[in-house]
Amino acid sequence: MVCATDNLLHLLVERIPTNDMSPIEICVVLTSSMVSITEQKYEIGHLKQLLDGNKIIYTEIDCSLEENRDTRNRYFEASGIRANYPQVFLQNAGGTQIKYIGSFKEIQELNEMNDVPSEILKADKISTLNSVFAGTVTSIVLT
């Protein structure tokens, strides 16, 4: 897991190696350290465990911090959902294309689909956690 403010996120993106074969996507998770709703606290913690357990590297943006306001609003615009955490996104390395993936519940469902036989997944065109996050950054080395 990588926690980042907007400035650090840009620094990390600059260090991601890219090639013409497949564009690199970055997983971004919106959270809030000031959330008071018990269910959201639970979902934030379990989402991070789920992503960590599946070795999905993500950038966590704490939306309660004033310095993350502009970044937070950009992601809220992409999802159409404000102040409901966690929210998971994929974005291109340049940050120009942001795609809302879902909340904890959607990510949990994608994870459960990893156990469905591949024949069923292909026949019904069902997405899995592995397929959705297949193009994400797998490691970041800061030098």
Image: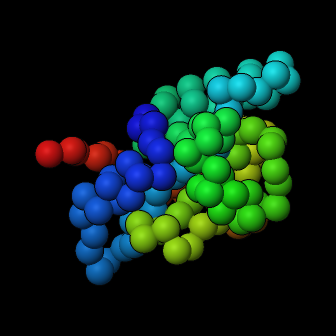
Q: Quadrant of the C terminus?
A: top left
Nearest the viewer among 51 and 116 is 51
> Where is residue 13 shown, x and y percent of the image?
35, 59
Residue at the bottom extreme of this rendering: 20
Residue 121 seen: no
- In the displayed structure, 18 sits above or below 6; it is below
Nearest the viewer among 61 and 42 is 61
- In the displayed structure, 96 sits above or below 86; it is below
> Where is residue 96 shown, x and y percent of the image?
52, 74
Residue that appears at 73% across and 51% down:
102
> Where is residue 78 shown, x and y percent of the image?
71, 65
Residue that appears at 38% across and 58% down:
10
Residue at the front extreme of this rendering: 66
Q: Quadrant of the N terminus?
A: top left
Residue 1 seen: yes
Nearest the viewer among 25 and 68 is 68
